[in-house]
Amino acid sequence: MGRALDGVRILDFTHVQSGPTCTQLLAWLGADVIKVERPGIGDITRGQLRDVPNADSLYFTMLNANKRSITIDTKHPKGKELLEGLIKVCDVMVENFGPGVVERMGFPWERVHALNPRMVMASVKGFGPGPYEDCKVYENVAQCTGGSASTTGFDDGPPLVTAAQIGDTGTGLHLALGIVAALYQRTTTGQGQRVLAAMQDGVLNLCRVKLRDQQRLAHGPLTEYPQYPNRKFGDAVPRAGNASGGGQPGWILKCKGWETDPNAYIYFITQAPVWEKICEIIGKTAWITHPDYAKPEARLPRLTEIFDTIEKWTMTKTKFEAMDILNQYDIPCGPILSMKELAEEPSLRKTGTVVEVDHPTRGKYLTVGNPIKLSDSPTEVKRSPLLGEHTDEILRKVLGFDDTRIAEFKASGALGGTKPMAAE
Ligand code: CAO
């Protein structure tokens, strides 16, 4: 069976997380991704957070599956010559270098467009045009500048970053969408275009409900927030703890075993249509008709008391027992699953969301597979490449070089050592 992006060739200059997550996704959708890496070093993550000595880290292997690796010194004149050749035969160039790097390298958009007018050139940057456009950015900087940190955490604590990599992987997803849209537009215009996804923009997009609340705040307190009714609201959206952020109040509640298990909790949503059932399950049938509890608006000032009461019930069940019971009545809830539980969950293995991959230097490891399932474009997760593993193959098959030409480029020093190896 074919795959959605069969025939699309990507020149991948990405590193660390935001860019690699984008090109990995495109590879899973069928694109041929050629990752250009610095000779001898490669993507810096190859050597970061290493668990197995002399083997590419999980940081790298989990973000660079299904790609090919070529080493090119992009500052070397012969390296630049190779890049020109690759630009001419690829459809998309993706990069997430610091601001100005690609221009210093000699490949600004105007030049890339002149070399190959059909090429889509896609970039992740920390910020879009404006006061911070020249700044380098990592995940948590984006979370802080995109509105996530100021709205995450508890009212009486500092701003918090979240474990979900919304700045990096979130922006990679945005960029991937921009790339496939540009490729689609190219089918009618015949031209490539520039695609930019700024991490601040991506995080703000994912935090749009908080900008919604910022505007609601001008019309009175946010009645579904835990600050209501007893605590004061300032002039900016406050941190709402574990409140749901939607129209149906929710909170994280303790379950049986919480004293020793840090994840013995369940997220419980008091969805209005199932309120009667909730009252029956927790033994509070009087609340079904009581004017202080019967209607959603009446419950808003009493949410703390309500969740405390529901928690007395959830504490008598394990999170999985509570999940089973509540779902019999369509009460939306979710056990807090640890990474250990997710890694061991058979249904995620079955769907290919969690995949075991074998690697020549590190052995078997788990990765998160393609979370997007297409009925006519199956994903097969393949291990990440060793540094420079495909240098010869790409020179020969993509650029059409013969032995003499390959030897010439090797001798120039533009490729570094071409023997496949784990980075230092
Ligand atoms: N051969 C030779 N040189 C190479 C090369 C190659 N194959 N690949 C990269 N380089 C060089 C670049 O040319 C650049 O050199 P100059 O600064 O001399 O022009 C140099 O490597 C550094 O590039 P950089 O600024 O991108 O890298 P950094 O480690 O200093 O910064 C990061 C990393 C992520 C902060 C920065 O790239 C950035 O802000 N990227 C945009 C935002 C982003 O994607 N952030 C998410 C990162 S994941 O958390």
Image (cartoon, helix red, strand yellow):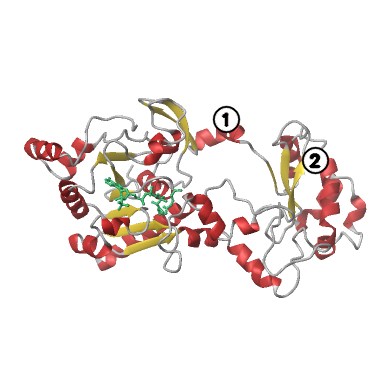
Residue pictured at 63% horizontal, 58% vertical: 150
- The tag on residue 415 is none
- Name the residue carrying label 2: 314
Residue 379 position, x and y percent, is 40, 41
The residues bearing labels 1 and 2 have C-alpha atoms spaced at a distance of 24 Å
Amino acid tagged 2: Thr
Q: Is residue 381 visible?
A: no
Q: Is residue 133 left or right of residue 227?
A: left
Quadrant assignment for the C terminus: top left
Q: Residue furthest bottom?
A: 219
Q: Is residue 297 visible?
A: yes
Amino acid tagged 1: Glu
- The tag on residue 344 is 1
Frontmost residue, 72 versus 402: 72
Q: Is residue 47 left or right of residue 272?
A: left
Residue 369 position, x and y percent, is 46, 39
Residue 359 position, x and y percent, is 38, 27
Instruction: Give the answer, above or below, for where 310 lies relative to 298.
Output: above
Q: Quadrant of residue 175?
A: bottom left
Q: Earlier in the sequence, mark 1 or mark 2?
A: 2
Residue 273 position, x and y percent, is 76, 57
Mark 1: secondary structure: helix
Frontmost residue, 276 versus 307: 307
